[in-house]
Image (cartoon, rainbow, N blue to C red):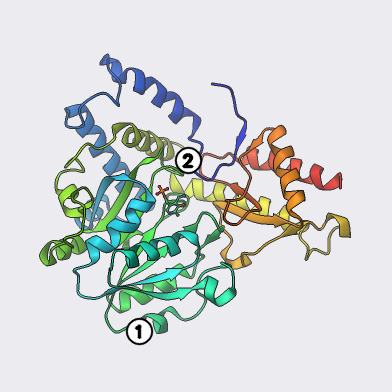
Amino acid sequence: RAEIQYYFGAGPAQLPKPVILQLSKDIFNYENQGIGIGEISHRSKTAQGIIEKTKEDILKLLTNNGKYELDQLRKDYDVFFLQGGGTTGFSSIPLNLNNLKGKGGYLISGSWSLKSFQEAKRLGSNVVSLYNDKEENKAFKGCYKGDYSKLIAEQDDLKYVYICENETVNGIEYDATIKDLAHACKQRNVELVADLSSDIFSREIDVYDYGVIMAGAQKNIGIAGLTLYVVKKTLLEEIKDNGVDSQLPIAFDWNLQNDNNSCYNTIPMVPLHTMYLVFEELLASGGIKNQELINIQKSEILYSVLDKYSTESTEVEEKQKIVKFTVKKQFRSKMNVVFNLITPELEEQFAKEAETNGFLAVKGHRSVGGIRVSLYNAVKLEAVESLIKFFEEFVNKL
Ligand code: PMP
């Protein structure tokens, strides 16, 4: 395929080059078996082996560089996969949790948590909105900033709190205050349920903060077609004891899938194998901590140049002050850098010139407009440095 140097799409996103090269071979002929990975039975020994190794890699990544023992993680959490993406997660979460004693409380900090809440309501699930940033601030600008303990204590029968950790469309990500939320949940025996579709394994995850982690594959961990779930074993047992909602489609039944090694029905092997290759690559290239440091660096250098040319800047000439942010600094996403330029015409011009110069897919989501630069794990520091250079040249021509 033609070499694309700089791809900043929000998802599906670029894969690490060694992964896509290996994948293309394995799709054609997996380990010299004369048949491709998408053509073999998901129940074959080969496929079962890949599923096991992928689950094991996920647990390895969750040990947080030795903070947790692999054996302990195996006892406390289950890992399974369902056909689908983030949106199937929006339905499967309330339906699997519906019969537990207590309701779900949603913290709405952007388009995806809003959509998830709307789906839970549409399904008639027992859920409430605990906070909606758009209602508070007229636009999505960040996450809840108040006292989580108080917010949670105000609800008397809360079973779980739902969040989207990184709002891909709005460029909003939880900062360190997520620890306060996790702590507040633990104090009241409330499970934290999180959509990590667009920031999973971009930084270390403290799995013990969560009851449920749900993530669609097509950003940091692979290609579309699969949803990853990491769920606390005690929660799965509780669901089993209480029975699931009769509306729950059988293919989305967490316990059924988990008990069948994610193979109650046909698991799509190409996305699953892609995930495996991504995890192997991540483990081999320094692990999550190393990746996290690179991601911090990438986002910091980009935000710093955008701040330099922002309408609030004191560093540059008036005509160069072209960048506007809606998102509060505290909640700026490290994965999706979302901003506006002072006019839609300038945004159009920037996106067009960027494309001509080889910087692809920087246009904002159709619902919010502006510019969005996605910096997932596979985007190299060098790509961001080149984009910055291009941006400064663009500004200097104004
Ligand atoms: N959650 C988040 C955070 C997302 O970014 C997306 C998609 N970009 C979704 C959910 C929905 O995922 P899907 O399109 O796979 O249903």
Q: Quadrant of residue 188?
A: bottom left
Tell me where residue 121 appears, x and y as whole percent. 34, 68
Tell me where residue 67 appears, x and y as whole percent. 35, 57
Label 1 sits on residue: 153
Residue at screen point 38% across, 48% down: 216
Q: Quadrant of residue 235?
A: bottom left
Extreme-left residue of the structure? 241
Foreground residue among 210 and 67: 210
Q: Secondary structure at mark 2?
A: loop
Is any part of residue 66 visible from this angle?
no
Foreground residue among 320 and 125: 125
Rendered image: mark on residue 106? none
Residue type of the residue flagged with mark 2: Pro
Relative horizontal placement of residue 82, taking residue 243 as reference (left or right) = right
Residue at screen point 49% across, 60% down: 111
Tell me where residue 244 appears, x and y as whole percent. 16, 61
Tell me where residue 329 appears, x and y as whole percent. 63, 66
Label 2 sits on residue: 12
Relative horizontal placement of residue 220, taking residue 354 as reference (left or right) = left
Foreground residue among 72 and 370: 370
